[in-house]
Amino acid sequence: MKHYDFADQFRALYNQAVKLYASGQTGAGTYFNADETAFLAANGISAQAMYDYAEDHNNGGEPGYDRALAIESVRRDYFLNVQHGQPSGQVLSVDSLPAKTDAVQGIEWLPRIIPKTKAKLRGELPDSLMYSCGGDRRFFKKHDIHPAEFLSLVWRNMDNDAATIDWVVQRSSKK
């Protein structure tokens, strides 16, 4: 695996996915050949995540290459250094997530995005969920949080949701 060229290879695959989606090709499983899929897997990235980025890029311009790279760089770091390059084998149940309207300390979406973010870190999101989807992006914008920053925050506080909540409350009050 090449580490120095990770961002370049990621950009090529991101651009490829955006182009394929724009041309009308659908289905995450159709976007990458065996070598490209192996590159993604070796870096803890799913083809579905790339497809989701391409779909949202084409339908609204977000999260965009820069945010996708930042998100996947944090995920990659966790995958390589905490998971030692081994997928967890678990998948988050969508039904286990709090409702989109649930709130903690008056902040909607926060109870939902914390477990979703943990699942993103561990590579456990089901294909039906995207980290930094439209709802996540509304939350991030409202509270002035970069999606990769939040991913790192949750990683630092993996077993301390209260610390994550306190940080978000404090950040939100400063904006």
Image (tube, rainbow, N blue to C red):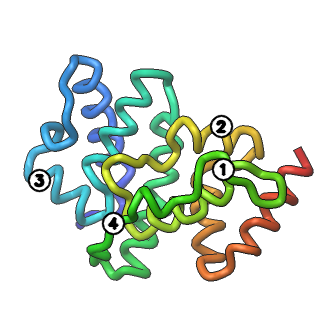
Foreground: disc 3 or disc 4: 4
Question: Could you say which quadrant of the image residue 51 lies in?
Answer: top left
Position of 158 compared to 173: left or right? Answer: left
Camera-side mark, 2 or 3: 2
- Secondary structure of residue under mark 4: loop
Q: Amino acid at mark 1?
A: Trp
Q: Which residue is mark 1?
A: 109
Above or below, comparing residue 80 to residue 134 in the picture: below
Residue bearing the label numbered 3: 35
Secondary structure at badge 2 equals helix
**Of callouts 1 and 4, the N-terminal one:** 4
Helix, strand or loop at mark 1? loop
- Residue 106 in the image: x percent, y percent? 83, 53
Q: Amino acid at mark 2?
A: Arg
Query: Is label 1 or label 2 in front?
Result: 1
Check residue 91 in the rendering and tell me which mark sits there, or answer none.
4
Examine the image and state in which quarter residue 137 appears. top right
